[in-house]
Image (cartoon, grey):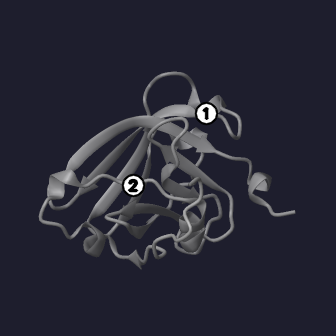
Amino acid sequence: MKTPMMQGPSPEVVGAQEAVNSPDIPAIDPQTMEQAEIEKVLGDVSYCTYLYTAESPPILAISNAAQSEGYRAVTKIHGRLVELSSDQKPGYENLKEGLVFTAEGLEMRVVSDGEGQPASAKPGELVTAELHFSLEQGLNIGYLGWYECKAEQSRAKP
């Protein structure tokens, strides 16, 4: 069956501490998200994403629309959506220095892997990047994957 008849409940949005509250901290990895989950937190805006593989769904989505508190991002941990924030504009041009997004007790940093020139990438182009995921409880892990920023008009509805 290609499309299941019933889907699980929509994940709830919680704080970082509640999402990572687990007796097995070393087993925590950001999970992939569907577009509806991303839009639940970010709304219907254009966003940049970090992917484990070039074909996988995103594990981190970053809004291109600045809010009064900066830029918002979302990730999924233990089936729960966690909102993060940063004052850095998401885009290819900031990957060399690294984009840092935080929530209480949690930090996600996306940085160029040193290969190629991400600042010269065009909208929609996948560039290799590292994601560093850290928790105050002592977890520090890195992933090598892909970063993509779509053109702002590509998210607009007809």
Q: Residue furthest right?
A: 158
Toward which corner of the image does residue 40 lie, by quadrant? bottom right
Q: Residue placed at 50% from the left, 37% from the top?
A: 146
Q: Residue placed at 69% from the left, 40% from the top?
A: 124
Q: Residue placed at 34% from the left, 75% from the top?
A: 15
Q: Is residue 156 left or right of residue 5?
A: right
Image coords of residue 53 (percent x, y): 48, 36
Image: 67 above or below 95: below
Image coords of residue 1 (percent x, y): 56, 54
First in sequence, mark 1 or 2: give its number.
2
**How many numbered marks have been drawn onto this rendered protein structure?**
2
Image coords of residue 117 (percent x, y): 57, 25
Tell which of 81 and 1 is nearer to you.
1
Q: Label 1 to label 2, Cα distance in Å?
A: 27 Å
Q: Amino acid at mark 1?
A: Ala
The label on residue 31 is 2
Q: Amino acid at mark 2?
A: Gln
Which element type, helix, strand or loop, lies under badge 2?
loop
Which element type, helix, strand or loop, lies under badge 1?
helix
Image: 88 above or below 6: above
Image coords of residue 119 (percent x, y): 61, 33
* Mark 1 closeness class: few <14, some 14–19, many ≥20 residues within 10 Å: some
Q: Is residue 27 left or right of residue 58?
A: left
Residue of label 1: 119
Report the quarter where the C terminus lies: bottom right
Q: Residue placed at 43% from the left, 76% from the top?
A: 13
